[in-house]
Image (cartoon, helix red, strand yellow):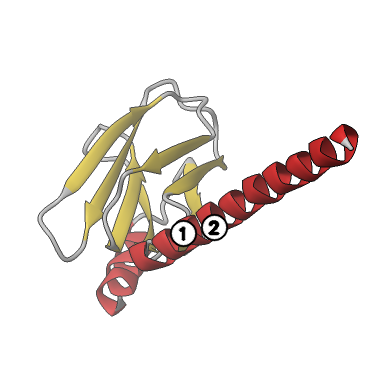
């Protein structure tokens, strides 16, 4: 985790001269299965597309997207558990870049299965109560 913060600080310090956009994450620790990266334009509007790169810090995995100049956010899903660094910059080599780090920690599968089993039990109980109530109503009508 400290590696992500150091890299973020270095890239932020290097990109302080004339950056036209900044990058912000909705949550620093993602558990919902998706993350939204917000792009806040601070300078004059760009006429060219912006490049968004997402790099997994502990595995050799990276993702690169080309964003429209007017795009204000991007939502990404399907990332594995771990720490990531998102970098926003122009495709030209001399432009400034901004970065933000975040972590992905999915919910435990055992918790999801336990909630599924609980829901199944409640459903079976509900259907059983409806059937017993229906049988009692028919028994009273036939008397």
Q: Secondary structure at mark 1?
A: helix
Residue at the image position 33 percent from the left and 51 percent from the top: 86
Percent position (x, y) of residue 114? 44, 65
Where in the figure is residue 16, as x and y percent of width and height?
42, 56
Residue highlighted by disc 1: 117
The answer to which image quadrant residue 13 occupies is bottom left
Camera-nearest residue between 19 and 66: 66
Would residue 11 be found to the left or right of residue 41 on screen? left
Instruction: Identify residue for label 2.
Output: 121
- Tell which tag, 2 or 1, sits nearer the viewer: 2
Residue 18, horizontal then vertical, whole percent: 44, 46
Which element is circle 2 on? helix
Position of residue 94 relative to residue 8, above or below, is above
As drawn, 116 above or below 4: above
x then y, percent, for residue 78 = 31, 44
Circles 2 and 1 in contact, beta carbons < 8 Å: yes
Answer whether residue 132 is visible to the viewer in this image: yes
Q: Nearer the viewer, residue 118 or 83?
A: 118
Figure quadrant of residue 139: top right
């Amino acid at each position: 985790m400290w590696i992500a913060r150091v890299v973020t600080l270095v890239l932020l310090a290097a990109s302080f001269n004339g950056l036209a956009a900044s990058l912000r994450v909705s949550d620093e620790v993602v558990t919902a299965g998706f993350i939204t990266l917000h792009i806040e334009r601070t300078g004059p509007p760009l006429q060219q597309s912006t490049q968004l790169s997402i790099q997994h810090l502990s595995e050799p995995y990276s993702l690169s997207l080309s964003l429209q100049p007017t795009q204000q956010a991007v939502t990404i899903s399907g990332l594995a558990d771990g720490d990531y660094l998102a970098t926003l910059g122009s495709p030209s080599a001399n432009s400034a870049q901004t970065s933000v780090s975040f972590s992905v920690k999915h919910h435990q599968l055992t918790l999801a299965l336990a909630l599924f089993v609980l829901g199944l039990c409640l459903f079976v109980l509900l259907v059983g109560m409806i059937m017993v109530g229906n049988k009692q109503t028919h028994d009273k009508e036939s008397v």
